[in-house]
Amino acid sequence: MSSRLVIDGGGSAVRARLHGDEVSTVELHESVNVVTVARSTVGERLGRLLDRLPPESGAPAMVLAGLAGAGTPSRTADVTSRLRERYPASLVHVVRDIDLVVSQLDGPGAALIVGTGAVALVPADGAEVLVDGRGFPVGDWGGGAWIGLEALRRGLRHHDRIGTSSLLLRSLCVELGLPTDRGVLSALQEDGVLTAQRVARLVPTVLRLAVEGDEQAGAVVDAAIKALRDTVVWALRRGGIAGEAQVVVAGGLVQQGPFRDRLAHSLATSAAVAQLRFVDPLDAAMPSG
């Protein structure tokens, strides 16, 4: 029997890693956020993901699933039931995606996830301090969807001021399949709904232009880095951690090298942060709490 199966599901993708005699990792580029995606659809997507694992790998002793939005038993009951049905001999835990990151803290500090969304958590005296994670479009400052939307807003506003499209706006319109600046909102909608996933797909274009020196794209990335730093610092302050804090960071956006480097520099130079580590949620061993 393999030791454990860890599932990390966010707003744009879900991954699973089977830890045993050999390690197998699989990925599916679909959202499993249990707030924004129908529970039956989440279960179906998890099933397709797990079907990709090697058939000879056997059943894990423990299944640990961290899913975006999994904050209450009512949100996780269907997923828990499906996982127990699939792995009847396994111990099943379904937690929030950030709990997989928090479990890798080995001292006072904060966990930060930066993917499609953004949220920081500080465990404090049996309670917790949660900063942001409010969801797109009202929160998740500095996350992928926020960056995509902010880039579009700035590009469109610049067009309104001078009457021509900047390189940033032209590049984003190409990504959206638009010939001009008109129709942006419609292009971002799926089934009539403005989706975080669609907006977050613009991030690689924004980051590429920022690296190439585009002023508008650089300003968007600067604003995202500042927002994320503020989120962490506020979480530590509200959690009563004055100094010597450890921060662990995970998420799809920090897989982008230039963005990761800039975020690391910003956090490491904060007086509130003494130690910074980037971690993989799939390496979590036990559920937080």
Image (cartoon, rainbow, N blue to C red):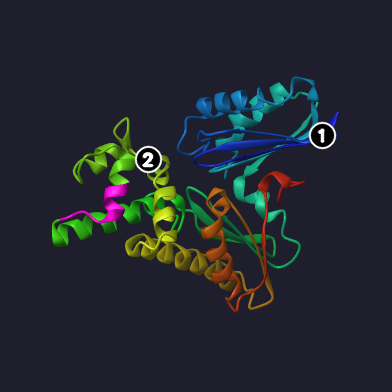
Q: Residue at x 79, y 29 (%)?
A: 90
Distance from disc 1 to disc 2, alpha carbons, whole Å, reads 37 Å
Q: Is residue 162 left or right of residue 262?
A: left
Q: Residue at x 83, y 31 (%)?
A: 2
Residue topped by disc 2: 195
Predominant secondary structure, magenta span: helix
Asked if residue 240 shows in the view, the reply is: yes
Asked if residue 135 shows in the view, the reply is: no
Q: Secondary structure at mark 1?
A: loop
| Pick the front one: 232 or 56 | 56
Instruction: Please tell me how crowded label 1 is: few (under 14), some (14-19), or many (20+) other residues with Cα within 10 Å.
Output: few
Q: Which mark is residue 22?
A: 1
Query: Which contiguous range is marked in magenta?
Result: 164-171
On the image, the x and y values in percent for residue 223 come to: 41, 65
Q: Amino acid at mark 1?
A: Glu
Q: Residue at x 79, y 21 (%)?
A: 56
Q: Quadrant of residue 130?
A: bottom right
Q: Secondary structure at mark 2?
A: loop
